Amino acid sequence: MILSLVVVIASLTIHHTVAQRVLGAFLGVVLVVAAAQDLKRRKIPNWLTGPAALTGLVIGAILDPSGLPQQAFAGLGAGGFLFIFAVIYPKGLGMGDVKLALVIGICLGSAAVVAMLLGLVLAALGGLLVMRDRGVAAGRRVGLPLAPFLALGGVVAILVGPELVTWYTQHESLTSIWSHAFAGRSG
């Protein structure tokens, strides 16, 4: 509960739009509850994700109606991305994670990319640490809950996600920088 309060206060004090502040504060609470549920029960309940997705859309519709299409697109993108993996390997990824990603997208818009990327990288690092400690064969059989990692990524995205997206879109991509750096060199 204290962690939720800290995330809410941080979200409300950052310099984003009113809609981003309110959606970030709301998402912060959802993420803390989802992470706790996933750690304790290894499940992210529908009673959390369904109403959270709807509430995120309603908040967006009230505070920033013109941003509603971006919210919907980001939610479907984030949820759809994890849905692919849930279909391919259902033992490794649950539908609760997919629905949580949907909520993250709805609440963060384009900044959901930051949350998803960071959350998945952190989860991969966690998996590597387990394999290091238990051995690769035994470590691959250990299931890690994804929600705590998505929650960490989500909190970072709440606080600095819009700035990271803006910075990235206003600068040359790493691929472009790489190609310019080595243009004309033969190998």
Image (cartoon, rainbow, N blue to C red):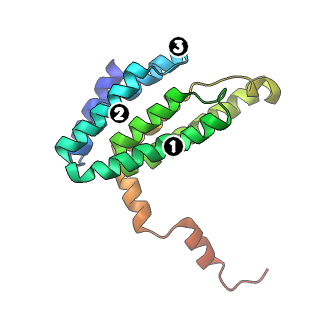
Q: Residue at x 55, y 38 (%)?
A: 83
How many neighbours does mark 2 have within 10 angstroms: few (below 14), some (14-19), or many (20 or more)?
A: many
Q: Would you name the residue on which mark 3 appears?
A: 41
- Identify whether 28 is placed above or below 176: above
Q: Residue at x 74, y 23 (%)?
A: 141
Name the spot of residue 3 as percent of width and height, x first: 35, 23
Q: Label 1 vs label 3: CA separation?
A: 24 Å
Image position of 87 (left or right of 78): right
Q: Which is in the foreground here, disc 1 or disc 3?
A: 1
Please state which of residues 128 and 104 is positioned toward the viewer in this rendering: 104
The residue positioned farthest toward the top in the image shown: 40
Residue 22 at least partly seen:
no
Name the spot of residue 144 as percent of width and height, x first: 62, 25
Q: Answer yes or no: do the residues labelled 2 and 3 have beta carbons within 8 Å?
A: no
Q: Secondary structure at mark 1?
A: helix
Q: Label 2 vs label 3: CA separation?
A: 21 Å
Q: Amino acid at mark 2?
A: Ala
Q: Would you name the residue on which mark 2 appears?
A: 53
Name the spot of residue 110 as percent of width and height, x first: 39, 51
Please state which of residues 143 and 93 is positioned toward the viewer in this rendering: 93
How many neighbours does mark 1 have within 10 angstroms: few (below 14), some (14-19), or many (20 or more)?
A: some
